[in-house]
Image: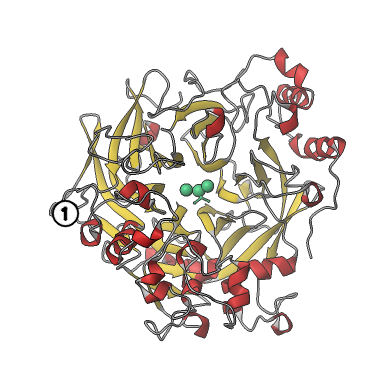
Amino acid sequence: MSADSGPDTSDTALARAIEARVSRRDVLKAALAGMAGALAPSALQAMPAGAGSTLGFAEIARGLDERHHLPPGYVAQVVLRWGDPLFADAPAFVPGHPDADAQEQQFGYDNDFLAFFPLPASGEASLRGLLCANHERCTAQLMWPGMTERSDRERMTAAHCAHEMASHGVSVVELRMEHGRWRTVLDSPYNRRITLRSTPIALSGPAAGHPRMRTAQDPEGRRVIGTLNNCAGGVTPWGTLLTCEENLHLYFSGEPEGHAEAAARKRYRVHGRGLYVWGRHFERFDLRRTPNEPNRFGWVVEIDPYAPRSTPVKRTALGRFKHEGATSAVSHDGRVAIYMGDDERFEYLYKFVTQARWQPQAPEANRDLLDRGTLYVARFDADARMHWLPLVYGEGPLTQANGFHSQADVVIEARRAADLLGATSMDRPEDVEAHPETGAVYVVLTNNNARTGAQINAANPRANNRWGHIIEIVPPRVNGAPDHTATECAWEFFLLAGDPSDALQSARYAGPVSATGWLACPDNVAFDPRGRIWIATDGQDHAAGFADSLYAADTSGPGRGITRLFFNAPRGAEVCGPCFAANGSTLFLAVQHPGDERGSDYARPSTRWPDFRSDLPPRPAVIAISREDGKEIGS
Ligand code: FEO
Ligand code: CA
Ligand code: CA
Ligand code: CA
């Protein structure tokens, strides 16, 4: 059963649906005029591109080459690269050889989400802090010689697999600003690597200890070694990191058919033919030997970066799916909402609302806030309203008649539970984040090239949506503050990405974007101290000569939704984890998988960013962007 609207693929229906959702009640007349122009492309030309934007940087040109590019007056410092030591006694990076023990003490591969926790913890415009970086995945053919293609997996030894496992996870590292540059503090007591290979992680919440979570290595079902495919994440109001497990299906081999978990695994596309071949050497990734292991991944993991010896916790109350991010918003009454996307085509948007209130003055009381609360999934309706549907065992269809015997079953099979509630199938939900001032929630949908005309719905109005879109959910206000606990909200489109000069794309912006300012495949977002949105992309059209990039736009006023191009990544890379620090004068960015494209390998990479040394492969790296004059970014 689905709440999706019926098939209606005509342009008129699309325009009608969009028009109903772009006309924000309080939007300025000028912006309305701009959107009307978007519906009739010739009128677009009447306004200069970017008119009214508060963003002061000169847009860069579209392009694609071996290097990154920034506007004039901006510089980028490479802060941390794959293999950089994180401890004073850590071994130096040695290219070309697997060494899992060394990797355990070095910065991991494919940095994704970034968070910056000030030091001391109460600091705000801190020039000292803990940078946390997710390490989502790795690319063997760019890490070691002889691994020419992903299909060439026969050459992966146990040593290679162990190194890959050690390259996954999270890094926590202290940075200090000295003489205008960020320095890694190698002797900091806070520095830490959390890896898939070696870090014990506790399970808490409804699924902890459940028989479906038990394995031979963990007969009680309460302790997992490691975390995987850590994509995006978030930061809680009480100062912990949330890191999210996304594409768990990539990691398991073996034939799952016939096992009691087979049907549940299928809903998560865990089919025993994963990209990684670890199951050949490590039995917990072989479904024939450890059939419950996939149930122990796909969770949100909470880490206290200020307590380097603390045990990270998988918070199962937040549901199991292919988590992109988990961002927090404090509601009007002190309860906390965590917004989450399930990044797969046709999957859903979720939020979790804590049962108890956040208590800023009582840190101990907040420690396990994420273990009790309500998980919801989103249904978008055509009347500009949306509903959050509770995923609660015993309510509605979530009963024994449908194979749910407890809340543990509901969270382990959150996708199937959401199916039964009639959630709206979305175009790959990536980041979902509430604006820090207005409370409006931005839902970033990266693309969906599989949606047919018969499958469009009010919130996902384009078939073969190769460009993605961003929805804005507006929660009701109580005593002037956004109510993130509400189960009914308003919604509208913030933008429909794509090239507005190509009518076939049906792109829509709130005003005229420049020829370089339009974007495709939005993924991670962040808000700067002035409340502007920064949008990183994953999947812009390399074949058309477009790098993945970072764009910025106002969220209100005449520049609302008018995106401007700020940064181009080197070829093969995606842009992740935008994160503002030091009062907005530093923007940390994660440049992920540079050189990862067809025909590019260790011997002949398509770029050697960021080192550009003939003896070094390309390396994922975190850069710190600042202005040459030290002023606020974007101003
Ligand atoms: Fe890991 Fe959805 O990007
Ligand atoms: Ca990614
Ligand atoms: Ca992502
Ligand atoms: Ca992505």
Q: Quadrant of residue 484?
A: bottom right
Asked whether mark 1 lies closer than 8 Å to ligand 2, one says: no
Residue 96 appears in the rendering: yes
Query: Can residue 236 be seen from the camera position used here?
Result: no
Q: Badge 1 local density, few (<14 within 10 Å), some, or many (20+)? A: some
Q: Residue furthest left?
A: 89
Q: Nearer the viewer, residue 256 or 484?
A: 256
Against 226, is 579 above or below? above
Q: Amino acid at mark 1?
A: Ala
Identify whether 420 is placed above or below 569.
below
The vertical placement of 626 against 161, above or below, is: above
Q: Quadrant of the N terminus?
A: bottom right
Which of the colour schemes (rainbow, by chain, secondary structure, one colour) is used? secondary structure
| x, y percent for residue 489 | 71, 51
Q: How many marks?
A: 1
**Residue shown at the point (39%, 41%) measured from the top left:** 590
* Residue 82 x %, y %: 29, 47
For mark 1, give the secondary structure.
loop
Residue of label 1: 90
Which quadrant of the figure contains the C terminus?
A: top left
Q: Nearer the viewer, residue 179 or 90?
A: 90
Image position of 600 (left or right of 85): right
| Place of residue 83 in the rendered image (x, y in percent of width and height, measured from the top left) | 25, 48
Along the viewing direction, whichever of 379 and 546 lies nearer the viewer: 546
Residue 131 placement (x, y as % from top left): 32, 47
